[in-house]
């Protein structure tokens, strides 16, 4: 009966492998030295070079067979991502080393979230010994004095992460339809009308728009009202894929085709077969990947890395970008032939500041949703916005668009002391804009609806709102922050650009 140790590689382990004496003992090395294991399977969310260094160090030090599985986590504390990684690794271990393999899960390396998932998995899905290690107590078995119902675990793991992600704009509804796109502005009505017209066809769509405008929600709604409804909708953030894994992520690989390819993997094209593939931030793809993507679109087939034959795929591609792809083509950062392959139909999502009347609607609908979703945590208190808070939020320029609006409202909801979110609490919930916003303002393309007057107004409203927030409503201090002569001059600017004073 083979004995297998599973653990996440921790920062202390990596430091120990580099010879950093201040790091202390490697918890994994401690366990391997104290217990007899036939195999060690390590999950890694650090850089592959760091994992490879630790793997070599451990094999040399302990003379044990070590396998490293590279895992992608949105955060080392995201329970849902960690759970998916662990419940993918354990079945692989049982398939590789036998169903009767004796499993041991190491709780000490990694984050507390990683330790909690090992405990949950050991108590509900896979029988395993739990161990921990320390310099003082050495390696010892951990006795966890409770059992969890297996059917409860998925909800228990997902609830906190998914609720906050969804409430802050990170996730779309499970089956989004055009009715989930809250709007009343003419620009959004025109966009939704065009999207409905595009939905029945299989032609590629390029969705353009600033970050946070809801491009994925629009793409998913198109899918749900297309003949491909019921088939997979597979979203991929191209900007989040490590450069050396782009080809594998898109087209898949076969077991053993490269270091770390422990099993066959179907890329997102195969995963989306007969359905819709949503390539978000497509402008982030490196040029060599763009060539291969173009070929896949043209030939309607892919070849996994290490594969010997092509795989036919029937996929509708919807791409999205917050860049000006025509400018990217002009500067040779994006292939012209790929652009025209993707931009058969083009939909431009307007920024929130250009959606007249939509902010008030969104505020009310999102607050209603918060009152329902947060009822248990708030003790059933139903919160509302004061008139001052509503005016302040309606006049804010929202450079982060709907995502910023949702996150700001969530902060205001949590920080507010009573059932009414006051203006001061709403102002405190507003945050500054990342430095990259300046470049966006200076480098916007001319023509095609560009208005210098509107742009200057947006900039003025943004900085006036920030100054009032930082000055906590003190107009004399706010005037000084934005370099205006006095209180009265600031008052005139606030009135001109309709910023709450």
Image (cartoon, rainbow, N blue to C red):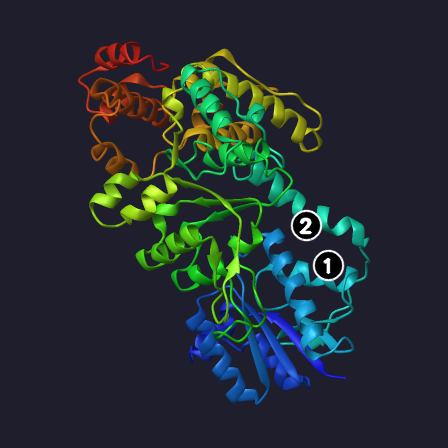
Q: Quadrant of the N terminus?
A: bottom right
Task: Decide: few, some or many residues near mark 2? Use Cα within 10 Å; few <14, some 14-19, many ≥20.
Answer: some
Where, quadrant-wise, is the C terminus in this rendering?
top left
Residue 326 appearing in the image: yes
Tell me what residue is drawn at x 55 percent, y 32 percent.
221
Q: Residue at x 49, y 68 (%)?
A: 11
Q: Quadrant of residue 463?
A: top left
Q: CA distance from mark 2 to mark 1?
A: 9 Å
User: Is 492 drawn above or below residue 43 in the view shown?
Assistant: above
**Most extreme residue toward the left, as rendered?**
485
Numbered disc 2: secondary structure:
helix
Q: Is residue 77 visible?
A: no
Residue 205 picture location, percent across and down: 43, 37
Labelled disc at residue 157:
2
Circle number at residue 79: none
Q: Which residue is pictured at 44% across the width and 21% down the height?
A: 188
Q: Mark 2 touching mark 1, by CB under 8 A?
A: yes
Q: Residue 47 location in percent, x, y? A: 44, 67
Image x and y of residue 106, in percent = 65, 71
Q: Nearer the viewer, residue 139 or 110?
A: 110
The location of residue 73, given as percent across then percent down, is 53, 56
Q: Is residue 13 above or below residue 488?
A: below
In the displayed structure, does residue 323 sit left or right of residue 140?
left
Question: Is residue 242 found left or right of 367 in the rendered image?
Answer: left
The residue labelled by disc 1 is 120
- Of 145 and 57, the residue lying toward us: 57
The kind of secondary structure element at disc 1 is helix
Query: Compared to 435, does 379 lie above or below?
Result: above
């Amino acid at each position: 009966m083979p004995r297998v140790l599973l653990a996440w590689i921790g920062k202390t382990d990596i430091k120990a492998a580099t010879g950093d004496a201040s790091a202390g003992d490697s918890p994994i090395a401690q366990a391997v030295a104290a217990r007899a294991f036939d195999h060690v399977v390590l999950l890694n969310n650090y850089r592959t070079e760091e994992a490879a260094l630790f793997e070599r160090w451990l094999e040399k030090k302990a003379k044990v067979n070590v396998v490293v599985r590279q895992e992608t986590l949105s955060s080392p504390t995201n329970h849902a991502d960690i759970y998916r990684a662990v419940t993918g690794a354990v079945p692989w271990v049982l398939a590789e080393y036998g169903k009767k393999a004796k499993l041991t899960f190491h709780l000490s390396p990694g984050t507390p979230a990683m330790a909690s998932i090992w405990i949950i998995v050991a108590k509900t899905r896979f029988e395993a010994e739990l161990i921990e290690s320390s310099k003082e107590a050495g390696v010892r078995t951990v006795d966890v004095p409770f059992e969890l119902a297996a059917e409860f675990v998925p909800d228990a793991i997902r609830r906190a992460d998914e609720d906050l992600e969804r409430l802050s704009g990170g996730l779309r509804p499970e089956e989004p339809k055009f009715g989930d796109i809250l709007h009343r502005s003419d620009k959004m009505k025109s966009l939704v009308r065009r999207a409905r017209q595009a939905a029945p066809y299989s032609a590629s769509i390029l969705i353009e728009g600033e970050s946070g405008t809801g491009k994925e929600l629009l793409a998913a709604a198109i899918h749900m009202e297309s003949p491909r409804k019921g088939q997979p909708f597979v979203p991929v953030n191209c900007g989040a894929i490590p450069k050396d894994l782009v080809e594998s992520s898109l087209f898949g690989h076969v077991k053993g085709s490269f270091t770390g390819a422990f099993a066959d993997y179907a890329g997102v094209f195969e995963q989306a077969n007969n359905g819709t593939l949503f390539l978000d931030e497509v402008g982030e793809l490196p040029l060599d990947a763009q060539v291969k993507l173009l070929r896949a679109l043209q030939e309607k087939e892919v070849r996994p890395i290490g594969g010997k034959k092509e795989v036919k795929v029937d996929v509708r591609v919807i791409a999205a970008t917050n860049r000006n792809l025509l400018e990217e083509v002009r500067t040779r950062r994006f292939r012209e032939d790929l652009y025209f392959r993707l931009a058969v139909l083009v939909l431009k999502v307007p920024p929130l500041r250009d959606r007249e009347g939509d902010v008030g609607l969104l505020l009310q609908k999102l607050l209603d949703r918060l009152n329902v979703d947060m009822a248990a945590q708030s003790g059933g208190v139903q919160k509302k916005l004061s008139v001052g808070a509503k005016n302040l939020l309606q006049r804010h320029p929202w450079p982060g668009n709907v995502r910023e609006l949702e996150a700001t409202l969530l902060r205001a909801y949590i920080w507010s002391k009573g059932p009414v979110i006051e203006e001061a609490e709403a102002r405190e919930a507003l945050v500054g804009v990342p430095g990259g916003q300046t470049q966006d303002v200076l480098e916007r393309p001319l023509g095609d609806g560009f208005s210098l007057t509107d742009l200057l107004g947006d900039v003025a409203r943004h900085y006036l709102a920030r100054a009032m927030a930082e000055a906590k409503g003190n107009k004399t201090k706010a005037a000084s922050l934005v370099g205006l002569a006095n209180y009265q001059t600031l008052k005139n600017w606030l009135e001109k650009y309709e910023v709450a004073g």
